[in-house]
Image (tube, helix red, strand yellow):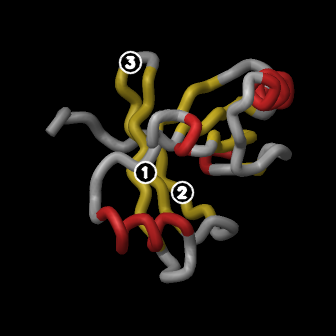
Amino acid sequence: VLNINPSKKETVESEGVETIFFNLGESKIELISSISKENAISKYLSKKSEGIHHICIEVDNIESEIKRIISNGIRVLNETPKIGADNKKICFLHPKDTCGVLIELSQEIN
C-alpha cells in the first residue's frame, strides 16, 4: 500500500511473535504475526481479528516515564521494562486507563 520495503525482520521468541519493520520518515510501522497459539497476540487476534494492536511512543528514559505514569494513576502491564523487538526496553500501559488503546513505551538500549 505504501510502496516501502521492510527495513528489518525479527523473531522475538520470548513473546512468540515475528515482526517486520517499515521505516516511514521519522516513524516506523511494525507488523506482528504470532508464531505461537498461547501468546497475547494470538489471544488478541482470536477475539478481535486483524487490525491495529497498539501504538508505540519512544521515550528517553523509560523507568522515569513509568514512575511518572503510575503517579498519575495510570496502570502499567509491566512495571519493570522488558526487552522487546528491535532490542528495545518496553512497557505497556493498561488499555482500560487509556480509552481502550494499548500504548507501548519504548526506549533504545545504548
Q: Residue at x 36, y 74 (%)?
A: 46
Of labels 2 and 3, earlier in sequence is: 2
Residue found 78% across the figure and 34% down from its top: 109
Q: Residue at x 63, y 40 (%)?
A: 93
Which amino acid, mark 1? Ile
Identify the element where label 2 is drawn. strand
Q: First in sequence: mark 1 or mark 2?
A: 2
Going from the N terminus, do you reach mark 3 or mark 1 first? 1
Crowdedness near tag 3: few (<14), some (14–19) or many (≥20) residues, C-alpha within 10 Å: few
The disc placed on residue 20 is 1
- How many angstroms separate mark 1 from mark 2 (CA)? 6 Å
Q: Quadrant of residue 48?
A: bottom left
Q: How far apart, in angstroms, are the residues tagged by discs 3 and 1?
A: 16 Å
Q: Nearer the viewer, residue 67 or 87?
A: 67
**In the image, residue 42 lies at what x, y percent?**
45, 72
x and y, in percent, of residue 106 in the image? 66, 34
Q: Are marks 1 and 2 in contact (CB under 8 Å)?
A: yes
Determine whether the residue tagged by mark 3 lies in a helix, strand or loop.
Answer: loop
Q: Position of residue 43 (x, y in %)?
A: 46, 72
Q: Quadrant of residue 11?
A: bottom right
Location of the C terminus (image quadrant): top right
User: Alpha carbon of mark 2 to alpha carbon of mark 3: how far?
Assistant: 20 Å
Q: Is residue 5 above or below residue 78?
A: above
Kindly identify the amino acid type of the residue bearing the numbered disc 3: Gly
Give the label on residue 25, or none: 3
Q: Quadrant of the N terminus?
A: top left
Amino acid at circle 2: Glu
- State the residue position of label 2: 10
Q: Is residue 43 left or right of residue 105?
A: left
Q: Nearer the viewer, residue 65 or 25?
A: 65
Vertical comparison of 60 with 108: above or below: above
